[in-house]
Amino acid sequence: MNNLFVYCEIEDGIVADVSLELLTKGRALAATLGCRMEAVAIGHKLEGIAAQVFPYGADVLHVFDDVRLAPYTSLPHTAILVKLFHGEKPRIVLMGATSIGRDLGPRVSSALGSGLTADCTSLEIGDHEEKKEGKVYKNLLYQIRPAFGGNIVATIVNPECRPQMATVREGVMKKEILRPDFTGEIKLHNVSDCVSDTDFAVHVIDRQMEKSRTNIKGASIIVSGGYGVGSKENFQLLYDLAAVIGAEVGGSRAAVDAGFTEHERQIGQTGVTVRPKLYIACGISGQIQHIAGMQESSIIISVNSDPNAPINAIADYIITGTVEEVIPKMIKYYRKNTK
């Protein structure tokens, strides 16, 4: 009881990357709290899930295996988690901020009467003092995320209600194996004890799933543009540079909203989170929503006509100038000095 739980999203017997990232972070949080980390797997044909989650440090794996539980539908998954959490009484529950997590998290939170913070960019353990009451709460989950349109970074705590629930977007946390030979306990649950026939009122007849044409998340080099690029025509310069250096092209929300590039290339709080070896930010001012999605890049180069642009504060190298001036020169000198 009072352990940390991670809900694992599963597709075709494979645990989603966001869940493995949360297992990595959950292991660190559990170590700080001195509690166990437990994983929850709900679906069908889950025999291989233990081998995927235990290396990330899961002490316990709760398995709910039934042919009716895959693919995901809201009601049975909600019923299972509510029943499980009523019995286990976790102190923290983590989910991915995916289409599934954004559907499931609020349902479970509402049923349990607990709080839920969505789209967290960081999770930490700390204390909180209610100054009016003079009461100190120890070892709370700091749920950190941009707020008020990204103008501030808010630290949200839930002193009283349990569990403390948070969703985190894919790519925000690092995915690291704790120990390849780490093993934990497997608990097999009877699904019929948790759900009723009415929970299966919805049947998925067919699903149409299309993979993204871009690989922003896995790119080692990204050339990204913002509204400061100026136009869709100027944005083509970024594609030219990317083609020369073997990079993917990304964009800020402002650039996407202006129609400079496609939504699937959007990087930031409302797009994807990336960690490339090299991130070239062109005409990007550096609003907190965008920085939240790329600040873990190994090397950041800022190309901006404004020497005081906020993104320059986190950039390793700063080139002051317009995209039209700088990018053609970068292409020229790269071609000249590369075999």
Image (cartoon, helix red, strand yellow):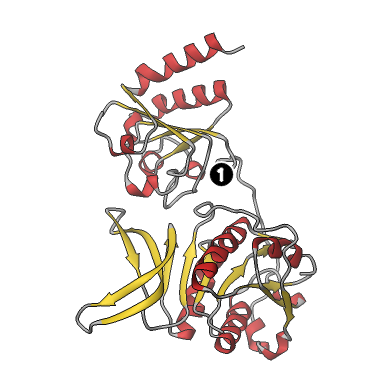
- Taking depth in this image into account, of 137 and 302 the one nearest to the observer is 137
87 versus 141 height, above or below: below
Which residue is under mark 1? 217
Whole-percent x, y for residue 291 in the image? 38, 45
Pick the quarter of the image with the C terminus: top right
172 versus 230 height, above or below: below
Q: Is residue 11 visible?
A: no
Whole-percent x, y for residue 61 in the image? 69, 74
Q: Residue at x 58, y 26 (%)?
A: 246
Quarter location, residue 189: bottom right
Whole-percent x, y for residue 192 in the image? 72, 88
Q: Is residue 33 left or right of residue 146?
A: right
Quarter location, residue 156: bottom left
Q: Residue at x 36, y 29 (%)?
A: 231
312 versus 269 height, above or below: above
- Looking at the image, the residue that sits furthest to the left is 132
Q: Is residue 116 left or right of residue 204?
A: left
Pick the quarter of the image with the N terminus: bottom right
Q: Residue at x 65, y 61 (%)?
A: 56
Whole-percent x, y for residue 47 in the image? 80, 69
Quarter location, residue 228: top left
Count neighbours of disc 1 (C-alpha within 10 A) and say few if under 14, some if 14 to 19, many if 20 or more.
Answer: some
Under mark 1, the amino acid is Lys
Q: Is residue 237 visible?
A: yes
- Looking at the image, the residue that sits furthest to the top is 336
- Taking depth in this image into account, of 159 and 271 the one nearest to the observer is 159
12 versus 316 height, above or below: below
Is disc 1 placed on a helix, strand or loop?
Answer: loop
